[in-house]
Image: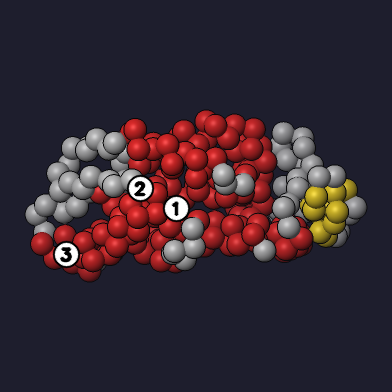
Amino acid sequence: MKRFYKEAAAAPVEGGFGVTLDGKPVRTPAGAILTAATPALAEALAAEWAEQTGEVRPLAMPLNRLALTQQDRVAPRREAVTTEALAYVESDLLCYRSGDDATLAARQIDAWNPLLDWFSASYGVTLAITDGLMPIPQDTEALAPLRSKLDGFSDAELTAFALLAPAAGSFVLALALLDGRLSAEETYALSQLDESYQIEKWGEDEEAAERRLALALEFQDIGRFLALNRS
C-alpha cells in the first residue's frame, strides 16, 4: 500500500508505549492498539514506519512484524505456543550427528556438545544423541523445568523463542540465545554447521545463498527485538 501518513512517532498509548501515524495510534490486524514494552522498542518501531517512502513494505519492517505477532498471535495463546515450542526438544538438531563423515562428526562434537552440557547443567535435562536418521525419543517426563522456564518468559521473550526454535531447528540453541549464552550471530552459525560444512565441500548455489542470508537476517531481527524489549 502507498504511504498514507506524513509523520511516524513513538508516543505513549494506552497500555504503555506505541507508535502514532499523524497522531493516530497504529493498530494490530486484530484491532488492538500496538504497544511496546519499552520506549526503545517504540522508537525502533516508529523508525521503521518513518523509513517507508512511496510504498509501505511490511517485509522491510521486521520489528513491527514481530511486535504484531507477539500481540495478536502469541499473547492470546501462550499455553499453546509453549506446547508447540516444547516439541522441538524431541527433534533437536544438536542431537542428530553424522554417522558417515568423521570430520563433520568431530565438528558437531566440538560445537554442540558444550551447549548440551550447559543445557543439562542448567535445566537438569540430558538429551540423548544419535548418529542415525530415525527420530530418537527423549525423556518427556523431564520437560517440566523447561515448561516452567517458558512460562516465565515475557510475551516478547516467548515470541522470540517460538520463532527461534523452528528457525534453528533446536530448542537448546533458542534457549541459549534467550539466556544470553549465545548471540544471534552465533546461534545462526551453530544452526548452520552441517550446511556450512557441505558448502565447504561442494560449493553453494545462488538460491541456497539467498536462503541462508534471509535466515541470518531473521536471527538478527529476532535478537534485536529481544534486546529492545529488555532495554
Badge 2: how crowded within 10 Å, few (<14), some, or many (20+)? some
Q: Could you tell me if residue 193 is visible in this image?
A: no
Badge 3: how crowded within 10 Å, few (<14), some, or many (20+)? few
**Picture quadrant where residue 102 is located:** bottom left
Question: Disc 3 or 2, which lies upstream in sequence?
Answer: 3
| Residue at figure coordinates x 72%, y 47% from the top left | 1
Q: Amino acid at mark 1?
A: Leu
Please give the residue where the numbered disc 2 appears in the rendered image. Answer: 124
| Residue at figure coordinates x 81%, y 59% from the top left | 10
Between 85 and 207, which is closer to the camera in this rendering?
85
Q: Is residue 214 above or below residue 34?
A: below
Please give the residue where the numbered disc 1 appears in the rendered image. Answer: 175
Please give the residue where the numbered disc 3 appears in the rendered image. Answer: 106
| Residue at figure coordinates x 70%, y 59% from the top left | 41
Question: Disc 1 or 2, which lies upstream in sequence?
Answer: 2
**Picture quadrant where residue 48 is located:** bottom right
Q: Secondary structure at mark 2?
A: loop
Q: Amino acid at mark 3?
A: Ala
Residue at mark 3 to residue at mark 2: CA–CA distance:
25 Å
Q: Tell me the mark number nearer the camera, choosing from 3 and 2.
A: 2
Between 55 and 146, which is closer to the camera in this rendering?
146
Residue at mark 3 to residue at mark 1: CA–CA distance:
23 Å
Q: Going by the image, does 136 lie left or right of 10?
A: left
Disc number for residue 151: none
Quarter of the image for the C terminus: give it. Answer: bottom right
| Residue at figure coordinates x 36%, y 64% from the top left | 189
Q: Tell me the mark number nearer the camera, choosing from 3 and 1.
A: 1
Q: Secondary structure at mark 1?
A: helix
Question: Disc 3 or 1, which lies upstream in sequence?
Answer: 3
Q: Tell me the mark number nearer the camera, choosing from 1 and 2.
A: 2
